Image (tube, helix red, strand yellow):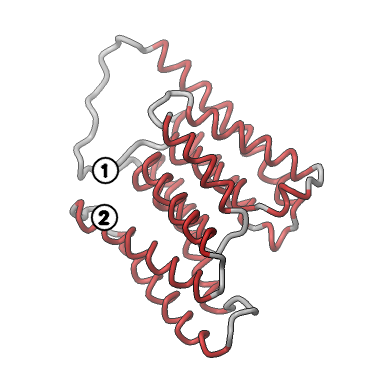
C-alpha cells in the first residue's frame, strides 16, 4: 500500500505540473511540492517495511496476465488521463505556429493517437500487441512534433525519454511517457539525460525515493521563481512520472 500510495502521489504531482500552462509556474509547483514530498515519504516507508519483512514468506507474484489491484491501477489511470487530455488539446488547438496546410494532417494524427491510446483500456493483451501500441504512439508523436516544427534533437530526446520511462516502469512507465509527450513538451532534452541515469539504476530499491526527491527539488526551484525550472516543465513532470513508474508494481 505504501508503494501504491507513493506512485499515486507522484502521478498526482505530475498532473499538477502538467497543468502549468493553466495555473502558472509557481502555482503548479506549489501544488505539486506536497505531493512530491508525500511520494518521498511513502517510498521511504515502503523501503523500511521491505527491510523489516526481509526473509518472511509472502504470497507469490501475480502471473504475467493477471490484473493489478486497483491501488496500482490508479496511478495508471491518472497518467492515462493526462495523455488523453494532451492529445485532445492538440486535436482541438494545434500549435499556432503550425502552417495552415498541415493542420488537417496534424489533427488526423492526434485522432489516430487517441485510438492507439484506447488500447490501454484492454487489460489482457499479448506482449506483441502491448509493444505495438506504444511503438505506434511514439511514431505518431514524432510525426506530430516534426509537423509542428519541433527541432529534431527534441524529437529524438522525447522518443528516448519515453523508451527510458518504459524501461523503468513497464506499462506505468509507458503511460507516464505519453503523459509527458502529449502535449508536445518543452525541456525534454534534460529529462532524457536525467532518465539515462535513472534507467541504469532502475532495479535499485531507492529509485522511487531518488526520483521523487529530485522532483521535489524541481518544485521548490520553480516555486521560488527559477527561470530555468519554469522554462522546462517537462523535466519536473517527467521526474514525477519516473517516480510513479518506479514505485508502481511492474508489468511486462
Residue sitting at 37 percent across and 12 percent down?
53
Classify 148 as above or below 174: below
Residue occupied by mark 2 = 130
Quadrant location, the N terminus: top left
- The residue lying at 39 percent from left, 62 percent from top is 138
For image coordinates 39% across by 51% down, the residue present is: 174
Instruction: Pick whichever, 225 or 89, lies toward us.
Output: 225
Instruction: Give the label on residue 20, or none.
Output: none
Q: Residue furthest right?
A: 225
Residue 51 coordinates in the image, percent (x, y):
42, 12
The crowding category of the residue bearing disc 1, from other C-alpha atoms within 10 Å (few below 14, some 14 to 19, many at least 20), is few
Residue placed furthest toward the bottom: 101
Q: Mark 2 near mark 1, Cβ–Cβ under 8 Å?
A: yes
Name the residue tied to disc 1.
252
Q: Where is residue 172 in the image (x, y as percent from the top left)?
A: 40, 46
Number of marks in the rendered image: 2
Q: Distance between the residues labelled 2 and 1?
A: 9 Å
Earlier residue among tags 2 and 1? 2
From the image, which quarter does the C terminus lie in?
top left
Q: Does residue 195 sit above or below 15 in this rendering?
A: above
Tell me: 21 left or right of 157. right
Tell me: residue 232, above or below residue 109.
above
Question: Residue 165 placed where, x, y %?
Answer: 43, 45
Residue 164, image x and y in percent? 42, 45
Work out whether residue 133 or residue 164 is closer to the camera in this orientation and state it: 164
Mark 2, residues whose alpha carbon is within 10 Å: few (<14), some, or many (≥20)?
Answer: some
Q: Helix or strand or loop: what does disc 1 sit on?
A: loop
Between 28 and 184, which is closer to the camera in this rendering? 184
Tag 2 secondary structure: helix
Amino acid at each position: 500500500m505504501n508503494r501504491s500510495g507513493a506512485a499515486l502521489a507522484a502521478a498526482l504531482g505530475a498532473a499538477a505540473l502538467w497543468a502549468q500552462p493553466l495555473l502558472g509556474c509557481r502555482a503548479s509547483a506549489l501544488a505539486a511540492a506536497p505531493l512530491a514530498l508525500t511520494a518521498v515519504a511513502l517510498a521511504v516507508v515502503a523501503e523500511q517495511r521491505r527491510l523489516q519483512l526481509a526473509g518472511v514468506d509472502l504470497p507469490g507474484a501475480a502471473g504475467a496476465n493477471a490484473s493489478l489491484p486497483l491501488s496500482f491501477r490508479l496511478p495508471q489511470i491518472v497518467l492515462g488521463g493526462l495523455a488523453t487530455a494532451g492529445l485532445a488539446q492538440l486535436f482541438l488547438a494545434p500549435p499556432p505556429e503550425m502552417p495552415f496546410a498541415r493542420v488537417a494532417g496534424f489533427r488526423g494524427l492526434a485522432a489516430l493517437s487517441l485510438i492507439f491510446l484506447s488500447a490501454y483500456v484492454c487489460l489482457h493483451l499479448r506482449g506483441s500487441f502491448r509493444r505495438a501500441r506504444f511503438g505506434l504512439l511514439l511514431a505518431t508523436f514524432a510525426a506530430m512534433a516534426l509537423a509542428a516544427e519541433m527541432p529534431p534533437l527534441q524529437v529524438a530526446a522525447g522518443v528516448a525519454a519515453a523508451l527510458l520511462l518504459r524501461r523503468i516502469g513497464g506499462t506505468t512507465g509507458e503511460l507516464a511517457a505519453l503523459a509527458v509527450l502529449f502535449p508536445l513538451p518543452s525541456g525534454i532534452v534534460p529529462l532524457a539525460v536525467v532518465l539515462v541515469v535513472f534507467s541504469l539504476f532502475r532495479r535499485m530499491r531507492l529509485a522511487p525515493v531518488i526520483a521523487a526527491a529530485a522532483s521535489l527539488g524541481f518544485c521548490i526551484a520553480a516555486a521560488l521563481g527559477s527561470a530555468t525550472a519554469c522554462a522546462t516543465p517537462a523535466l519536473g513532470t517527467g521526474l514525477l512520472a519516473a517516480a510513479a513508474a518506479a514505485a508502481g508494481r511492474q508489468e511486462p
